Image: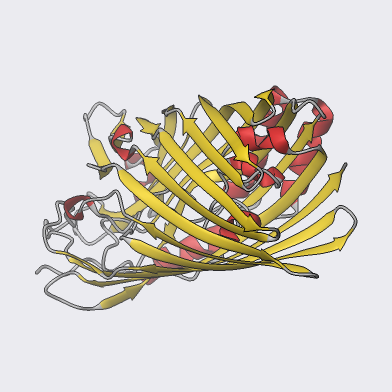
Amino acid sequence: MTPLRPVPTILTSRLRSRHLSRNCAQMPGTPWCALLRTLSRDAWRCGSSWLAAMLIGILLTTGAPGAYGGGFLVGELSARGTGIAGILTPLTDNPTSIMVNPAGMGFLRGTHLSIGTTVTLPDFEFLGIAPSTQSSKMQSQVLFPPNICLTHTFESGLGFGISARIPYSSKTDWGPEWIGNTVVIGSEMRGVEVTPVLAFRPTPLIAVGIGLNIVSFRVRSSDLVPLADTTGTLWAIRGFEGDAKTGYGVEVGVTVKPLDIVSIGLVYKSPVAISITDGKVAYQALPPELVPQYPDKRFTSEFTLPQQLIGGVGLRPFPGFLIAGELQYVHWSDFGSLQFHVEDGSGLVLTEQAGWGDVLTTRAGVELQLPEVVLRAGYAVDRSPIPDPELRPSIPDAHREVLSAGLGYEVGEGLTLDFAFQSIRYRERTVTTSRVLTESGTPFNGTYLLSATVVGLNVSYSWK
């Protein structure tokens, strides 16, 4: 096998120095600045000015995005749900349920505000390229997507609310010197979703909710490419970065409580078309004499966020005890592929992802109310939508099991703290039929060893 070209030390030092100097004034395209721009734009569109300002101010204090779910779908949206393996669809007593099912708000009363984050610590390793078993570990990351929701429900069951969260996110950073640097160095896919919702109860036992999903999406990717110089020994990092036009989708949910001890939730989320029309292709740390040969270019890309159908049941066989289950069907075949069409007259098309299939996630959880605290636990099984031949280190994925635990504590009248912990264990995944090729034409076969730890915290207050 032809060895991959290592990155020269002078190139990596230039890149580190550039990274350390970034801030919102100098680099308005950084992820954090993009999150603020997204929320300021979309929250103002979908609500009043005071509400938008509050959303932005709270998210300023909770951190930057990034998390892991099936493909790039995030399942850990709030600490309450995270503690019971991500179940929110059948819940009728917590405002964060509107992040999945807007109908649950119809059974609340009064005004509710919840602010939180789910801190994720991924641990990803790759053994290869086969037949080698050389170990490469992804650089350490601490990722914390924020979430916030605000609801108000009248006595009649008519309710209004808004939520902001990051339900689509994947971020990797393997570094410029790893064995797969000509495939990917780092990548990010992130979708910020702001959703105004409305709920009403046509009968005392049924609530219906609808929401408008306003999605802003960003894609970034980088790899190592050879430069056209006389020596044939120069390499540079090529970066792709693009912000999509705002995408729109709808969600419709129904919650039924045939008995006081039973709640059933069902929600449909429509697909969302994402279009990047003015992405940027740039080369980093070029030697000065080669800068004129490698000007910035533009790229376009189009893909679809998948439609989803989610159903859940909650059962309270006796006061203070909840048993809940949930099924989530994600139509990942809507996604199709992620391709970068470079607009420089060459007709170059780079495929970043392709061939994803539909998956079903199953979740189960329990909750026990004690005199001082609420205890939670959950278990989930989630399948990867990515087939072996199309698996890439930009979104490493595998079938996985999730174990979760949580704790709820009422600090005072109306004020509640929710904590959650999840251990995500991916199955060891060995790829022998990869269609992904390195610069030398070698199939990117090898073994992925993946795990992640999630810690969630939400602070909620209710005015009833």
- Looking at the picture, how far across and down is residue 86, in whole percent? 53, 54
Quadrant showing the N terminus: bottom left
Q: Nearer the viewer, residue 83 or 24?
A: 83
Q: Which residue is drawn at 32% across and 32% down?
A: 334
Task: Give the quarter of the image for residue 220.
Answer: top left
Query: Residue 349 vs residue 148: left or right?
Result: left
- Looking at the picture, how far across and down is residue 76, in whole percent? 54, 54
Q: Which residue is drawn at 67% across and 38% down?
A: 163
Quadrant showing the C terminus: top right
Furthest residue toward right = 413
Q: Give the vertical position of 3 relative to 80 (above or below).
A: below
Q: Nearer the viewer, residue 283 or 405?
A: 405
Q: Give the vertical position of 336 relative to 137 (above or below).
A: above
Query: Residue 84 vs residue 93: left or right?
Result: left
- Looking at the picture, how far across and down is residue 104, in whole percent? 64, 37
Q: Give the vertical position of 127 relative to 439 (above or below).
A: below
Confirm whether residue 238 shows in the render: no
